[in-house]
Image (tube, grey):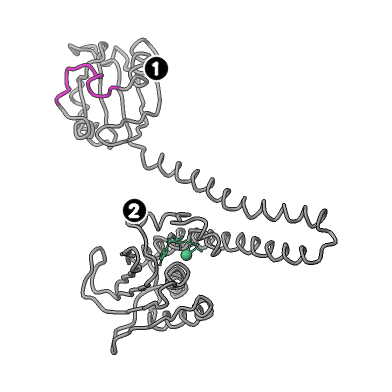
Amino acid sequence: MQLKLLLPVLDGLTASVFVLDAERRVLLVNEAGKALFGSALIGADFVQTVRNPQCLKAISKVLEGAKKAELVITLRKPVRTTYQVTVTRLGSKEFSAEKDQPRAVISLENISHVFEAEQMRSEFVANVSHELRSPLTALNGFIETLKGAAKDDNIARERFLGIMEREAKRMNRLIGDLLSLSKVEADAHIRPEQQVEILTVIKQVLSVLEPLAKKECVDVQLNIPAGIEEMVPGDVDQLQQVFVNLLENAIKYGGSGGLITIAVSEKDSTAGVPGPVIQVDIIDRGAGIKSEHIPRLTERFYRVDKGRSREKGGTGLGLAIVKHILARHRGRLNVTSEIGKGSTFTVCLPR
Ligand SMILES: Nc1ncnc2c1ncn2[C@@H]1O[C@H](COP(=O)(O)OP(=O)(O)OP(=O)(O)O)[C@@H](O)[C@H]1O
Ligand SMILES: [Mg+2]
């Protein structure tokens, strides 16, 4: 059989495939391999293509008689990529007519996405455990104290019970947020089907958060031009959650300016959202957010000032939930901020 005849078959694969001779020289490379590693390497030692010691060792093993070798390698150039590598020995009979006898096939399959997902998952579990551990530790500590030293101290008991209640509520909120995040993720590919009156949603959110605004001494101003087309396709509960999370943040972290404006407008188009949109700007006059934090705000558990957010009962999941909900609605979140002047969180929803 002629080796070249295999090429059209190999070109149909997404993995990069190389056929090597007994001296480790490249005899054949498929399209995917050429696209990734260049085609000038035919005839050259495979080390010129992939300079990875473990990979070369696996190839040597196979060239010396092993049937197969498998391993995972990460190459740094041109961009960091992780590959599942399989090296298989070719029998000498099939290609006995060939001048340079092919001896091994090596395939490299890009598994970076699987690898990254795995890494994200384990990071996530570590974060959740960490976030749950601190309130639990506090609860345990106070239970000990109440059973022992503070057994008959009424004043201390009242104070400790208050703290315990706050910590238990924090755990409850964390679990609630985790559940809604996983629900939004599960529905990510199902387009929302209801028609939602966006102004009604915003007004409801405003009345829900009125007590918090009062407590923090913030005025919330609603700015809606007359005759706006307020219907958007969406999930009413989820959109409500978007605006609760954003307005709650504006009050908690941007409330020092005393005034928050919610401005609704219509736009013919906006970057990254198809067709006409409804835009909602939530503008605070607080301390603002340093630019290096802005791209990371929607990461799970990311908080600019951990201590301050904790003290306000935050878990760092609010904006991650917002981002996922908006993605499901094919919408977008944009953040601009100026230190000392305040921040604007902009939601764009396709109409
Ligand atoms: N309007 C704002 N002004 C200043 N900082 C903000 C504003 N909104 C959000 N942030 C910062 O972004 C961080 C992430 O916000 P996010 O809503 O995701 O979490 P959280 O408010 O800490 O907790 P949660 O919303 O889960 O209770 C906050 O901790 C805060 O540091
Ligand atoms: Mg929040």
Q: Which mark is residue 292?
A: 2
* Image-based side of 134 in relation to 189, left or right: right
Numbered disc in front, either 1 or 2? 2
Q: Which mark is residue 67?
A: 1
233 to 120, vertically: above or below: below
Disc 1/disc 2 C-alpha distance (Å): 52 Å
Q: Quadrant of residue 45?
A: top left
Q: Amino acid at mark 1?
A: Lys
Q: Residue furthest right?
A: 152
Q: Residue furthest left?
A: 40
Residue 243 in the image: state x and y as whole percent.
Answer: 42, 73
328 to 232, vertically: above or below: above
Residue 35 in the image: state x and y as whole percent.
Answer: 19, 35
Disc 1: residue Cβ within 8 A of ligand 1's nearest atom: no
- Along the line of sight, the residue nearer the viewer: 270 or 33: 270
Residue displayed at 73% across by 64% down: 161
